[in-house]
Image (spheres, grey):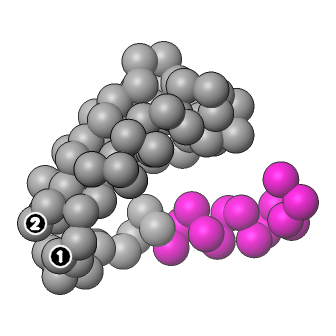
Amino acid sequence: MRGTANAHYECIKACSETDFTEDLKAIGVPVLVAYGTDDQIAPYDDSALLSAEPLKNGRLKSYDGLPHGMLTTHPEMLNPDLLAFIRE
């Protein structure tokens, strides 16, 4: 939240206009894709499956009603899942 409005705009613009499918297909390590269903930056229905499906070893974990910044706003919900994933 410390960046300029223009920097935030350009970041969202670049991410929304770039197809990362081939990059995701190239990732071979296990990946946990944590996604809030109330993400207003990258809406769940438009992004969650597109992020997880191309991964060779990806797992989508959905968090009902959580926002884009859920790692900051709800660490008590995500941290146990992150630790469990790492321990696997």
Q: In this view, does 64 lie to the left or right of 68?
A: left
Q: Residue 56, which numbered label? A: 2
Q: Which portion, as a residue range, is magenta?
A: 1-14
Q: Would you say the magenta stretch is mainly helix, strand or loop?
A: helix
Is residue 56 shown in magenta? Answer: no
Q: Answer above or below: position of 22 versus 44.
A: below
Q: Which of 76 and 46 is in front in this view?
A: 76
Q: Is residue 41 left or right of residue 28?
A: right
Q: Can residue 62 be seen in this view?
A: yes
Image point (71%, 63%), residue name: 8
Q: How crowded is mark 1: few (under 14 residues within 10 Å), some or many (20 or more)?
A: few
User: Mark 1 to mark 2: distance in Å?
Assistant: 6 Å
Quadrant of the image occupied by residue 5: bottom right
Query: Which residue in the structure is indicated by mark 1?
Result: 28
Residues under numbered marks 1 and 2 in contact, where contact means CB atoms less than 8 Å apart: yes
- Kind of element beneath mark 1: loop
The x and y percentages for residue 58 are: 19, 55
Q: Answer above or below: position of 49 versus 45.
A: below
The mark that comes first in sequence, 1 or 2, is: 1
Q: Give amino acid for label 2.
A: Lys
Q: Which residue lies furthest to the top in this view?
A: 65
Is residue 4 shown in magenta? Answer: yes
Q: Give amino acid for label 1.
A: Gly
Q: Residue 43, which numbered label? A: none
Q: Can residue 40 be seen in this view?
A: no
Image point (48%, 17%), residue name: 65
Q: Answer above or below: position of 78 versus 25.
A: above
